[in-house]
Image: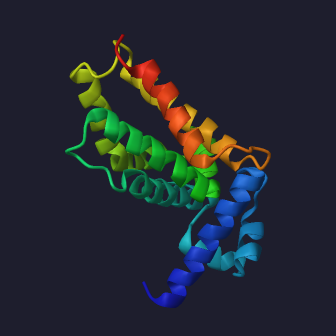
Amino acid sequence: MNRQVKNKRTAIMDAALKLFTERGFHGTSTAQISKDAGVATGTLFNYFPSKEALINSLYFEVKGRLSICIKEGLDSEATFEARMKKLWSNFVRCGVNNPEEFLFVGQFSSSPYITKITREEAMKEYESIRALAEEGFRNGKTGNYSMELAMMIFYQSSRAVVSLVLDSRSSLDMDEIIEEGFQILWKGLAPE
């Protein structure tokens, strides 16, 4: 892909991310995305044959970038608790450092616009995270809970912590919030 094509595609994706998180899918027209990206509407359709195709491409790319961010520095030799703590910290920091991407994924991960194929392909990036959770459950490092429920609580709790950190009224230190959030989560997961 040459530089000009990549720049136009990137501009379209960036504008779409911003507008979708601000206005939602229905409230965002392809004409507005094109305008904000500085390209003609026809140019948008050269890269993405439909609004749905743009949404799916954006979802896939954002999930991939967040996956890389979330897995950064995970040490496979560390204890299960240490790896979960690092994963938690990464997850929250990725959300704080990439609020539009984090919000986009949170808002639209269950959207009917995201196809099943896109969702399944994007989740392949998270197999190592799922494997880590399965290891903890299999080896008795967690209580006797549903792994699916625990993973959903992990995800939703991290979203709450990201929101708290981003809240400009919060006077708490980000590192303290991340640590306290993990301790609450860990105490809930740990076997009695």
Nearest the camera: 31 or 163? 163
Counting from the top left corner in percent of width and height, residue 64 is at 43, 57
Q: Residue at x 63, y 79 (%)?
A: 43
State the image coordinates of residue 81 (x, y, percent, origin top left): 33, 33
Asked if residue 146 is positioned above or below residue 61 in the image, the reply reads: above
Residue 30 placement, left or right of 134 = right
Q: Residue 184 at what x, y percent from top left?
A: 52, 26
Pinpoint residue 182: horizontal percent, then vertical percent. Answer: 48, 33
Q: Residue at x 41, y 50 (%)?
A: 122
**Vertical side of 18 occupied by 132: above or below:** above
Q: Residue at x 37, y 37 (%)?
A: 84
Residue name at image x 47 percent, y 53 percent: 63
Relative to residue 38, is residue 77 drawn left or right?
A: left
Identify whether 46 is placed above or below 105. below
Does the rendering let one see residue 152? no
Question: Which quadrant holds the C terminus?
Answer: top left
Q: Where does the N terminus fall, quadrant-wise?
A: bottom left
